[in-house]
Amino acid sequence: MEPEVHAVITVTDELALKQAQMADELIAGGGDAGPLTGIPVLIKDVMCTRGVRTTCGSKILENFVPIYDATVVERLNDGGAVLLGKTNMDEFAMGSSTENSALFATHNPWDLSRVPGGSSGGSAAAVAVGEAVYALGSDTGGSIRQPAGFCSVVGLKPTYGRVSRYGLVAFASSLDQIGPLTQDVTDCALVLNAIAGYDRRDATSVPHATPDYTQSLAADLKGLRLGIPEEYFVEGMPAGVAGAMKTAIGKLGELGAEVDWAVSLPHTPYALAVYYIIAPSEASANLARYDGVKYGFSYQADTMWEALEKTREFGFGAEVKRRIMLGTYALSAGYYDAYYLKAQKVRTLIRREFDRAFEKYDALVTPTSPTVPFKIGEKVDDPLQMYLSDVCTLPVNIAGLPAISIPAGFDNGLPIGLQIIGKPFSEETILKIAYAYEQATEWHKRRPKL
């Protein structure tokens, strides 16, 4: 599939064969094999892998080889996983289509002329065509869930602090979170079991009890209250997407859930503006480390300042430069209060609004994306339209909540995702709802016909 989909940046064939042999020996010897022992995985190329290059989809790190593993990679290795390689992504996870990769664009396996979503588009596309049984992605504003919706796979963004970010190359540190992309909800729960949990090396990791998420999977939703926020059914949403959402939500009601359509989260329309102040501001600080001195691409020049400027000029792509400039402007003297400080205040309002909703509802249900996958090149020259692709997912990151996207239908052969949002550390609840819906429908069984 790879010559058509272009989902993988680096293939770790020798490592995969070595790990597979170790898994075979463990199983044959009656050792303590876990549910992921010997199972092939792909890792988004934004997580450090010892001895395996980690590019972040950027020329500035094209030949960077870490000397340590991210915590999630360590935990998968301890569980006997088989690493097949590193997946393509928008550069430094900045994008919604995987067109911003400095290396190549990834194609949607349902229609090769369309994008797979982003920034974890390589991981989503690879899982959709079966290149790996599961993959890891990262989600800063929808980068797991939106491509999961676009590729008709399952994608979970855990609660902020539930999964360690140690070894994740930072984009926006108060928003980033690692999570699984899988073909079904059961696999999603199994992978979350493996990667979740406290890590002392991550200052934002929360020492919260981690249950066995597979125990929460049940087909009965009786007693659960689900809210449907009206703001997520945005103006201009295609009739096919809106219709699929109403059908899916109706199915949740048939499964026993109490569904309330009269829900409003009035600060939702401000989430896009808040995100594109906070995220670029944090990015401008995080990406300052790429100076051509310590590691990565380095432009050779006569003076230090010329070398620094040219390294960033030729090392960073257009979208990364755009966000660095946005963030630097928002943090600059005279504008900090007007932009960054105000955005943080609105962020608090959005979080409080969710808190009030969860006093009444066990979960909120929305579309994952307001559209189906768009054509490659269709929005690349219109940043605002590209940013609007994540309008349904951004608020979740702003509030630090868990959310999952699951397959919920098709519009003219193109996938549609259903998003389930939970209160902090309620991954068990959203997995239960997702599993019940999945078992009552056939969408997760359909595969691209490549």
Image (cartoon, rainbow, N blue to C red):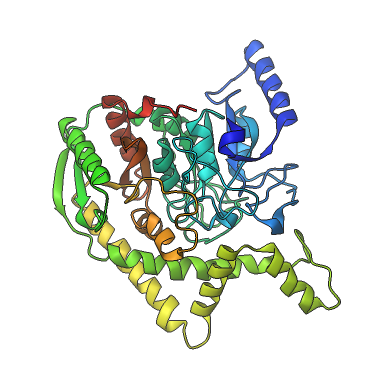
Quadrant, the N terminus = top right
Is 249 left, or right, of 315 in this rendering? Answer: left
Image quarter of residue 385 = bottom left
Residue shown at 65% from the left, 69% from the top: 288
Can residue 17 be seen in the rendering of this structure? yes
Residue shown at 26% from the left, 62% from the top: 353
**Measured along the vertical axis of the image, is residue 203 above or below residue 433?**
below
Residue occupying the far bottom of the picture: 334
Residue nearest the observer in this picture, 392 or 51: 392
**Measured along the vertical axis of the image, is residue 344 above or below residue 252?**
below
Can residue 364 be seen in the rendering of this structure? no
Image quarter of residue 434 = top left
Residue 179 location, x and y as percent? 48, 43
Residue 143 location, x and y as percent? 47, 50
Residue occupying the far right of the picture: 302
Residue shown at 72% from the left, 46% from the top: 53
Residue shown at 70% from the left, 55% from the top: 61
Residue nearest the observer in this picture, 202 or 419: 419
Residue 159 location, x and y as percent? 41, 49
